[in-house]
Amino acid sequence: MKLKKFTAPTTREALQKLRAELGEDAIILSTKQTAAGTEVLAASSEDLDTVTEKPAASSAPVSWTKTERTQFAAQEATRQPTPAEKIAQQVAAQRDVLINRAPAVTHQIPGAMPAPDMISDVAKRRSQAASDAMVNEQNAVLEEIKQMRQLLKDQMTMITWRDALEKNPQRGELWNQLTQSGFSPLFARTVVEKLPADLTDSQVQDWVMNVIKKNLNVVPADKDIVETGGTFALVGPTGVGKTTTTAKLAARCVVKYGADSLGLITTDSYRIGAQDQLRIYGKILGVQVYTAQTHSDLAQLRNTMQRKRLILIDTVGMGQRDSRVAEQTKILTDSHVKRVLLLNATSQPETLDDVVRHYKSTGLNGAILSKLDEAIKIGGVLDVVMRHKLALHYIATGQRVPEDLFPADPRVLVHRAMRARSSQAFQASSEELKWKMAQVSTTGI
């Protein structure tokens, strides 16, 4: 096997030389730092595949000295067999077992000779077992080679990523800031990779905040639910604040257009007192609350309220993996009801992402962020909203009706997200951050 050294001032340049000469599948054997820079020792994958076995001791040249023959014999005694030799040894061993054990069939019945067909079947089964063992060994060797190549590629990617961070430390600081604010590592990496060079620290902050604001889809104030009107159902898991948010929206509508402009419907017959809670709000607003249990109930109520400017439906809370979610979605979709998803800002980003994926099956008309007053970090919920391209209608910041409901403002949301910080117990050290950044660069997590 031919080994080649590549030396360059930086690791990236050395890898570029390596790839240019040996190709993308080259095998890196070692790297080290020298006075001239980074030195990489590598070989091409073709050279690795064509490595031949060492000659046996019996084929050694006659001209060897006694000392040389002794050294060669010692090396052969300690040399580990190659994968090809292992397979050959296993096949030979299986063949020996087959030859040695086949005659033993004659002793199974005293005084009787074995049937030829019985010996043939035993031989076939043992031959097949030997063949299967060889195939399994070959597959295991191929899998190890694949894992080795993937490991080497990951290491090369990690080296490239670290070199990029060394050249522009602002990238590492920005990645740290975004992840500590609750944004996913994948989102942070995507943003960091597009960070322009030669920016001051304040310019970096302005740049990243503008990037997030441009990716947030916020419904304009003149096109929100109350202004546009129609029939909307507030959906989502249990405990996200659907009933309270329905009351807030109802109050905004009554204050602006009067009690006759609003219709209130509830489908929540599971929770004790759920209907009574909304009826109390309705009584305060001077609006009657109706209950719909089936698709026909909902259709009949919609016909009765067709002159209403806005119809709000408070639905029963269901976990995203509940089988009833699909049934509820079908009833609302068949009734031409627009669905608005409530997202709890205090939930884990992974949970929020799962909620959106299950409730988004037939399309959503937007989202409302609830419990922002309880959330330490809101980067996670904003990340989910941007990833799924949801339109934000409102943000809810408390239990007061109707005061604690505001139109979504991207400036407020981004400022709140970027100034959030984890407590010391949940912050990673600098070394842990470097490892995590390198890991994300290779896995894309």
Image (tube, helix red, strand yellow):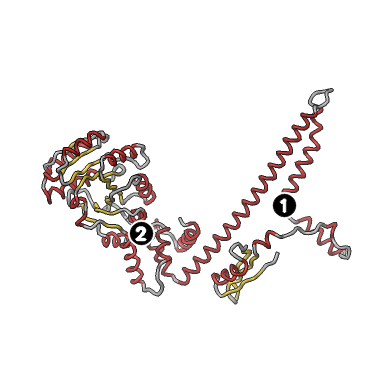
Q: Report which quarter residue 9 is drawn in.
A: bottom right
- At 72% from the left and 41% from the top, the residue drawn is 130
Q: Quadrant of the C terminus?
A: bottom left
Q: Quadrant of the N terminus?
A: bottom right
- At 72% from the left and 54% from the top, the residue drawn is 82
Relative to residue 206, is residue 400 depicted above or below? above
- At 74% from the left and 51% from the top, the residue drawn is 85
Q: Report which quarter residue 336 is drawn in.
A: top left
Residue at numbered disc 1: 84
**Residue 196 placed where, x, y %?**
40, 71
**Residue type for callout 1:** Ala
The label shown at residue 181 is 2
**Residue type for callout 2:** Ser
Q: Classify residue 45 as left or right of residue 175.
A: right
- Label 1 vs 2, first from the N-terminus: 1
Residue placed farthest to the bottom in the image? 36
Relative to residue 50, is residue 94 depicted above or below? above
Q: Nearer the viewer, residue 414 or 22?
A: 22
Relative to residue 252, is residue 70 depicted above or below? below
Q: Classify residue 391 as left or right of residue 428.
A: left
Q: Classify residue 275 as left or right of residue 165.
A: left
